[in-house]
Image (cartoon, rainbow, N blue to C red):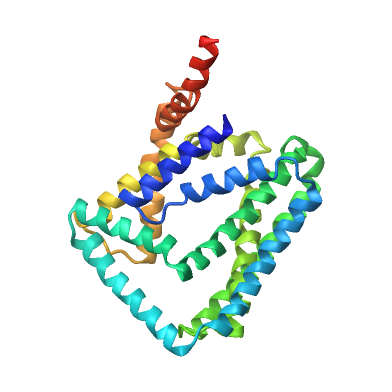
Amino acid sequence: MYLRRLAMLLVIGLVHASVFWTGDVLHIYALLGIFLVYGLRHASDRCVVGLIVVCFVYQLAADLLRLVLMTPEFIAHRVKQAQDFEATNNAAYGFGAFSDTVVENVRVLAYRYVDLWNLWAEFDWYTTLAVTMMIGLLVGRHRFMQRLPDLMHLIRKLMWWSLFLGLALGASFTLIFELNRSPEPSLIKVLGGLCYSSSRLSLMAFYMLVIVRIAQTASGRRWLLPFEAAGRMPLTNYLLQTAVCTTLFYGWGFGLWLKVGPAAGLALAALIFFAVQAPWSLWWLRRHERGPIEALWAKVTYAPLVQSTQTK
């Protein structure tokens, strides 16, 4: 059953990446989910923790290896490739028809997984996400969410330490990469990459612990209702966000590509969530048990099992 659902998610992710948006993460979640469910289902806690350490060590070793392998000539070649892709991206996404964006998406997706250097970088991203998922595996395995009242004192301490470390590490990697903007790899950039991975993990823990603390009070649970509704139909909202944003930004829609800065982008993201996705999720879940895409996903994956049972 799990394999069928993950396989379906993999298909959805690949279609989503090749037709609508190359930044898709669903297919990565599906592949890592298959690894977690079938590779680590019976692994000991020590094994899982060991794999988390291995992921961090791998990322550090890979960055150090790039210092040896990447020559100035090779770096110049890769920079030229990146500039060419940026130009075709801007032409297709900013001014092209829908068919142009599909062609560009397929081209970018193929480049991500066919080019060996890109594939190496992609594997770094896989290990980064795998760390988060393996931590989630340990949290679920030890039923931490069911033991929250007994853990609140520890949660308060971890929350503030996570915030402090996340901000300090985040400031460090930002400063490192702002002061070292040239494309050449260097030891200081290796340190910056390590700061980024650690900052991401620390801030993720902080966000999660804040939500846990807020959810322990009645007023907090009421305040979280819109987020809860959106979280109960994540696949629907993920794909809905793609539909809204590609319509806003791509040339075949309103053409806002390269016309929205970081501050306006943040404001637009908040507007999309609070004015569209949260109200839509609350309205839908008052009338249905799950989101429309989640219901379709369940029907496609469970129907063959039901038919098989009925046949027997």
- Give the tally of numbered discs: 0
Name the quadrant containing residue 195: bottom right
Percent position of residue 15, x then y: 36, 45
User: Is any atom of residue 258 visible in this view?
Assistant: no
Horizontally, is 46 left or right of 112 in the view?
A: right
Q: Please name whichever residue, 301 or 221, is drawn nearer the observer in this view of the structure.
A: 301
Vertical relation: 49 (above or below) 189: above
Taking the spot 32% from the left edge, 76% from the top edge, the residue there is: 83
Taking the spot 44% from the left edge, 60% from the top edge, the residue there is: 113
Percent position of residue 219, x then y: 61, 36
Q: Please name whichever residue, 249 or 90, is drawn nearer the observer in this view of the structure.
A: 90
Vertical relation: 71 (above or below) 82: below
Which quarter of the image is occupied by the C terminus? top right
Percent position of residue 311, x then y: 51, 10
Q: Please name whichever residue, 210 or 303, is drawn nearer the observer in this view of the structure.
A: 303
Percent position of residue 258, x then y: 28, 66
Horizontally, is 71 left or right of 34 in the view?
A: left
